[in-house]
Image (spheres, rainbow, N blue to C red):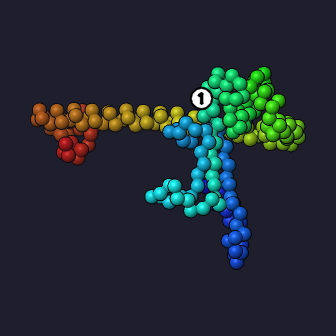
Amino acid sequence: MLLDSAANYRQIESGTPFTALKPTVGVNILDYVMFSGRKHLHTSFVLTAADDPGFRLTDALLIHVIELPKLAQRDTREAAASLAALSPLEKWVYFLRRRGDGTMTDDPILKQILDEEPDIRKAEERYRQFLADPQVRSRYRARDRWQRQQATRMVVAREEGRSEGIELGIGQGRAENARQNARRLKEKGVDRETIAYATGLSTEEIDAL
């Protein structure tokens, strides 16, 4: 998100006065939690002094981060007996989550939002028009398939890493057990060739014990 914001900030060419520079606002909508230590689903970032966060360098660069899962974590379905419990941003987040995960069918809260919020209703209409295009629908499905494949690869990679870690731990445990047995045999005066044969350690390893 920093790279995208920085790229958008390069608006003016060489020799152009800085007064021509327009504010750059980045809005990042995440389907995962980035800041687990914060309960707020919306976090804004600006450039401030390191020793005085209240002192801003400029308002020309602003980055918004909206974490969609945090709305679900707050049990909004149960808490929102009426739309009065939802802020304007929360209504948009609610719509995006239900539209994104395909659970908007027969959702009374979402139906009420679409009935009472013209901007969100317009977004829903534009989205339906968007999906009505066969080429767009094909690209959407390809993107969804790619995301599922990426998620599967991540799970497989974690499982393989866990297995490798277990195998490494077992190997290290066996090596330590062999060293302990070699020490006991050395203490009993057994020659190193016999110890090497019994434990699988080299004579150099035995001498180093």
Secondary structure under tag 1 reads: loop
> Residue 79 location in percent, x, y?
64, 24
Which residue lies most toward the bottom here?
A: 15
> Residue 112 location in percent, x, y?
78, 27
Q: Residue at x 71, y 63 (%)?
A: 22
Q: Is residue 206 left or right of residue 134?
A: left
Residue kind at label 1, given as amino acid type: Arg
Comparing 42 with 84, the one in front is 84
Using the rendered image of the protein, determine whether residue 151 is visible from the camera's viewpoint: no
Q: Residue at x 27, y 32 (%)?
A: 177
Q: Residue at x 64, y 22 (%)?
A: 78
Q: Residue at x 67, y 52 (%)?
A: 26
Residue 155, quarter of the rendered image: top right
> Residue 40 location in percent, x, y?
58, 38
How busy is the neighbourhood of tag 1: few (under 14 within 10 Å), some, or many (20 plus)?
few
Residue that numbered label 1 is attached to: 74
Q: Is residue 147 left or right of residue 160?
A: right
Comparing 124 with 115, the one in front is 115
Comparing 189 with 32, the one in front is 32
